[in-house]
Each structure stands twice: as structure tokens, then as C-alpha cells.
Image (spheres, grey):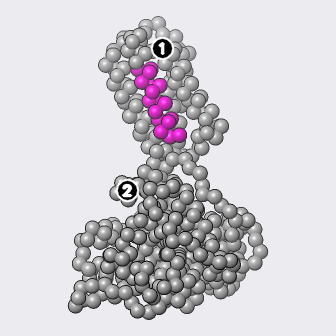
Amino acid sequence: MEILILVVTLVFELAIAVYSIVTKQSRSKIKSWTRIAMFIGFMMLSLGKVVVWEYTWGLFAGLLFILAFKEMFSLLRKQTHPPRYKAFSTLWKFLLLALTVVVTLVPVLLFPQHRLPQVTGPYAVATATYSYVDKNRIEEFTDQGDNRFVNVEFWYPEQAEGTYPLLVFSHGAFGIKSSNTSTFTELASHGYVVVSIDHPYHSFYTVSEDGKVVTINPEYMQEFNNANKGGYSLGEYFELNQKWMKLRTDDMDFVMDTILEQAEQKKDPVYERIDTQKVGVFGHSMGGTASVALSRERDDIDAVVNIDAPFFSELVYDKVTNELTAKSEPFTIPLLNVYSDDVWIQLDRSSSYIANSISNKNFKGAYNVHFKGAKHLSLTDLPLFSPILANLLQEGRRADIDKYYVIETQNELILRFFDYALKNQGQFAPKATY
């Protein structure tokens, strides 16, 4: 729809320019009524829900309004001396206006209208946001001596009785807590309390309850990008990942402790819905890595979902041989691994993913699912909200699989897995490839 509106608008403006050149008129009733009709047509599309109104349409709608208002004024005003016609001026104005049209449509092109993934559960879903301050940790990304704070958002059954399992989510390297909102909503609609964490200075941006905005730390971003480009030795790369994992797991540990403590007091409509005896963790990319790592540290985690992440916590670095090897301790917690092509092809040939290998006997009970044709970000909601940004962040690599099929199937698999592992409902026997 966005591309169609862009093309139609440019065609109409080109027709107006050509008409002006042919008739040698800089002003005409046809031009005025055409622009007025364009504004009315856009408003009718909005009112008819053909164009789903979002703030991203604001600039374009404002431009159409200004052009229509200008032409209405021109029609009402009597002109005794028509302006002198200049073909070059007409052409120049068309090019300038065409550029303006494109610029005003950039927000819509970046974030096009889309349908939300299907929610299948019986419960209406409510949300709530909180900011937690960890009085036992000083923020390492600033030199002000402040305690570290962590922002979280809950998705939970709004009008339901009883208590429900708690699921804790951690986003990817540059992600945000809403990266997999469709997953959280689907889970909550089936009777789960889902909390997603913003890791300050690791997340792209985060906003606390008091309005404090924190964006991603440039040094962390540079470290991560250099690591992906092979800018560090294997030993340095291993140490960086251990540092990142410590911050992530400390955040998740603190959030879980805070929530479980509040749940015992039952003084809040969100916390009182939590069954403290049934806890699962999951995450995408670095968040998935942290989820696996945290499940090794705590004995109250009952199930884990790893979405497209390496098991960095399961690796040991040998300085003598300069190699990464997998630990030998069996993983006994129910585990679901969901992989895109980006990770799947590395499981048996990359040292960073050696612990993820399907042949790793320590994870012989894990469920492994591969979405063939999917890219790393296909397993988040980003391709739904902004296909252009998703492709840019994946260096122009497009997924060869329907984006709705991926996210809706993944949501169903995660739901069925947690139902099986935490609620003892049904069986879980996923296909190896989707």
C-alpha cells in the first residue's frame, strides 16, 4: 500500500507538471482540483481503514493538506494578472515536490502497515512496566556511582483467576524488550506471566518509569561489531563473551529475585498471578545465550528456550592449544533450540558453536528446530514492523521464508514446549525442519 501511494502521488504530480508545460500555464483549475482530490482521496482511504492510520503517516498527510489548502486558496482568489510561465521553474518545482513526497513517506516505508500475528489463547492480555534498582551493583557504564537499574515489561492474563508460570525473556545484542511482543502476547493469552528485560547500555534504547532514556553504549557496540568481524584473538573473544554474559545473567538473576520476592507478598495484580514454583527462561541471540547460562546457575529454572544463540557458557578456552571446547557437564533441564539458517550452518563447523552441536552428548535431550530459509532476525518481530530495517541489519540478506509463517510457527512451538515442560500438558515432538 505504501509503495502504491508513493507511485500514484508521483504520477499525479508528474501529470500536473506535464500539463503545465504543454499548456504553458503555471496555475490552472485542473491542477488545483487534482491536488484537492488527492487529499480527499487519502482521507477516504484512512477513514475506510484501507490505510491504517499511524503517526508515521503524519508528514505525508500534512504535505497533502498544505498542498490542498494552497490550491483552495488559489481557486477562491481572483487573479487579474496571471504569473509569467517558465518551463524550467515548473520542472524544478516538480523535482523538489517529488523529493518532498519521498521524504515524507520515509517513516511509512521504514515501518509499513502490517497485520499482527494471530493470538490463539482464551485470555485477554494486559501489560505493565516497572523499573528495578539493584542496590548491590554499581553501574559500570557510567562514572557517577549510580546503582544499576533494569527496566522490565510484563504481559499477563488480564481477567483470570489463579496463578501462572513465570517466563523471563532476554533480548539480543542490540535489541529491546519488545523484540518478540507477538510471542509474549501469545504466551500470556494461554496463561503465562511473561516478563521481558531491557538490559541498559546493551539494549538499543530503554526508558525507565521516571522517563530516563538510556541508549546503547558506543564502546559495547564497537566491541560487538569488532568481534563479529574477527577483530579479536580467540582468547580475547572468549573473555568478551564472558563479560557480556556476566552482565546479562546478573540482570536476569536480579529481576527474577525481585519478581519472586514480590510474588510471595502478593501486593500487586501482576505479581499475584505468578506461580513461583514454575519458572522458564528464554531469549533471542545473546539473550538466548544468557538464558542457557542462567539455567546453570539457578536451581529454580524448569525450562529453557534458546532462540538462535551459541552456548558461550558451555565453552572452555584452552590457552595452550588456542581452542574452544565444550564442557562435559550434562544439561538436564528441558531445552528447546530454535535456529535460523545463519546459525544452523555453523553448528558443526564453527568453534563458537561447538557446544551447540547436535552430536554434543551433554545436550542429547534437547529439542532442535531449524527454520529453513530464515535469517537471524526472522525469529523476532522486526521483519513484520520493518522489513527494510531487518534486511539492512542482516547486511541485505533477505529471508527465503514467509515472515508470518516463521514467527507464528515459532510462537506455537514455544507455547507447546512450555505447556509440556511447565504445565505437564500434552506431548512435545516438533519436526526437525520447518
* Mark 1 residue type: Ser
Q: Residues within 10 Å of mark 2 (few under 14, many from 20)?
A: few
Q: In the image, what residue occupies the spot 47% across and 25% down?
A: 12
Tell me which segment is drawn in magenta. Answer: 1-17
In the displayed structure, does residue 337 sit left or right of residue 166? left
* Mark 2 residue type: Arg
Near-viewer residue (21 or 329): 329
The CA span between labels 1 and 2 is: 48 Å
Which x, y percent locates residue 302?
A: 59, 85
Which x, y percent locates residue 185?
A: 62, 65
Which x, y percent locates residue 29?
A: 51, 14
Can residue 396 be seen here?
yes
Q: Which residue is mark 2?
A: 397
Instruction: Give the answer, above or below, for where 397 lies relative to 147.
Output: above
Looking at this view, name the residue that lies furthest to the bottom. Answer: 329
Instruction: Give the answer, above or below, for where 121 lies relative to 259.
Output: above
Q: In the image, what residue occupies the spot 43% across and 15% down?
A: 19
Near-viewer residue (99 or 210): 99
Q: In the image, what residue occupies the spot 46% across and 63% down?
A: 372
Q: Secondary structure at mark 1?
A: loop
Q: Main secondary structure of the magenta part?
A: helix
Give residue 28's mark.
Answer: 1
